[in-house]
Amino acid sequence: MAGAITLPLHMQRDRYDPPSRMAELRSAPGLEAVNTPLGLHAFLATRYEDVREVLGDAERFSSAGLPALPGSDGDQRVGNLLALDPPDHTRLRRMLTGEFTVRRIRRLQPRIEQIVADHLDAMERAGSPVDLVEHFALPIPSLVICELLGVPYADRGDFHRRAAVQLDLTRPLSERGAMAAESRAYMGTLVDRATADPGEDMLGMLVREHGDEFSRAELVGVASLLLIAGHETTANMLALGTLALLENPEQAEAVRADPAVTAPAVEELMRFLSVVHSGMPRRVTRDTEVAGTALRAGDFVVVSLPAADRDRALVEDPDRLDVGRAAAPHVAFGHGVHHCLGAPLARMEMATAFPALLRRFPTLAVAGEPEFRSATVVYGLRHLPVSW
Amino acid sequence: MKIRADRDVCIGAGNCVLAAENVFDQDDDAIVVVLQETPEGADAEAARNAVGSCPSGALSIEET
């Protein structure tokens, strides 16, 4: 599948690593001219400093200027925080932030521990070997975001399938657009149900507390984004992170043995793997320059999050996974106003899941060829066979 | 050192609370609350990390 298209440079990987060309670009002056999957001519930022400059300035670098996917319902960007600039972005995001404070997320810890334990039990019952993606990495974040949002977990087969197509860059744009419309239609039914009878979940809370400030389409857009972002990203971090740990047994042992290693290890895995290739391309709003490269109003800039996170300006020896190093201010969750809203939740899921998995199965090992997925918005693994 | 926090700029990411729990908190809307304006010792070091990892640029340090 991935062979059917030429992946743009900022989505290419060599297992965990950005392609070697990224290192050359980081040490060359200016920004590189590239083409994006949507056929846009764009400039690529690879240095940590440049990536932070672009993502940190929503006024010069807009997220709102991308052409819509053909075949979608035209509504697709309404409520999609990723495709909005301040002040619209600020208004919608502020209605959600209270749900994602560090304190609120910490209250979910016992439930997340329970969900992880249940899946480890089920994995043990299924018996060695299993596909870790199917039994662990995907279902845990899916169940967590479903419970949080108020989405029936029984519907997961359908929304996993739709999300997979939407994020698959080898699919025709029209098919991806149509699938985005289908996802919105599904979420529309849940929003209508929550509007009629708001429950204790996040959809219910948004209706109760902010019902007058949201249009229906905005609520559908926000909820659709949270559902996709809540399972695709963390699932791939759990799968790819487990593989990276198992291939570096001394690092897996450190995570298994010492609870104090967990938090910095999660940050290091985020930095090292940076599963989101780039986030939304940014449209330049006025003539400006970055790293000495002149940019014209209307140009696009894409950033490489993995390249920035492998910059020596961020950490020493950046191409080495070292869960023992001090947490670095990486950009794997993005930077600027679009920095991942769910970061505290994702961190807690990872900090709970990795050590629990490694402790339950002390002999856990890779039991076959892992299948990487690269032609997708989120990098990761399609399958990871493991045994114990 | 003196910590400055611009609550209008804050996006509620919570990185500061994770980096320096003794220095920062979030209100019910996730917006930053400074618990110690002039942290010292280990708290000062943690606060520097928090400022470095703030995605919105809401935090700054004034050296005194």
Image (tube, coloured by chain):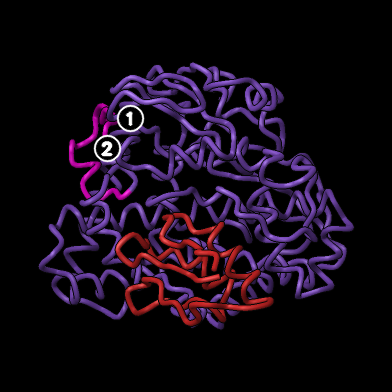
Chain colours: A purple, B red
> What's drawn in magenta, residue-wise?
A65-81
Q: Is residue A249 left or right of residue A170?
A: right
User: Which residue is farthest front?
Assistant: B64
Looking at the image, is mark 1 or mark 2 earlier in the sequence? 2
Residue at which label 2 appears:
A64
Q: Chain letter for mark 2, please.
A: A
Query: Where on the picture, by quarter, is residue A324?
Result: bottom right
| Residue at the image position 36 percent from the left and 67 percent from the top | A152
User: Would you say residue A140 is visible in this rendering?
Assistant: no
In this view, A147 is above or below A45: below
Residue A198's disc is none
User: Would you say residue B20 is visible in this rendering?
Assistant: yes
Residue at which label 1 appears:
A283
In this view, A334 is above or below A304: below
Residue A240 position, x and y percent, is 67, 48
**Amino acid at dot 1:** Arg
Along the line of sight, the residue nearer the viewer: B16 or A79:
B16
**Amino acid at dot 2:** Ala
Which quadrant: the C terminus of chain A? Answer: bottom right
Along the line of sight, the residue nearer the viewer: A114 or A293:
A293
Q: Chain letter for mark 1, please.
A: A
| Residue at the image position 47 percent from the left and 55 percent from the top | B55
Q: Is mark 2 on a helix, strand or loop?
A: loop
Q: Do labels 1 and 2 share a chain?
A: yes
Residue B14 position, x and y percent, is 47, 68
Residue A365 position, x and y percent, is 83, 55
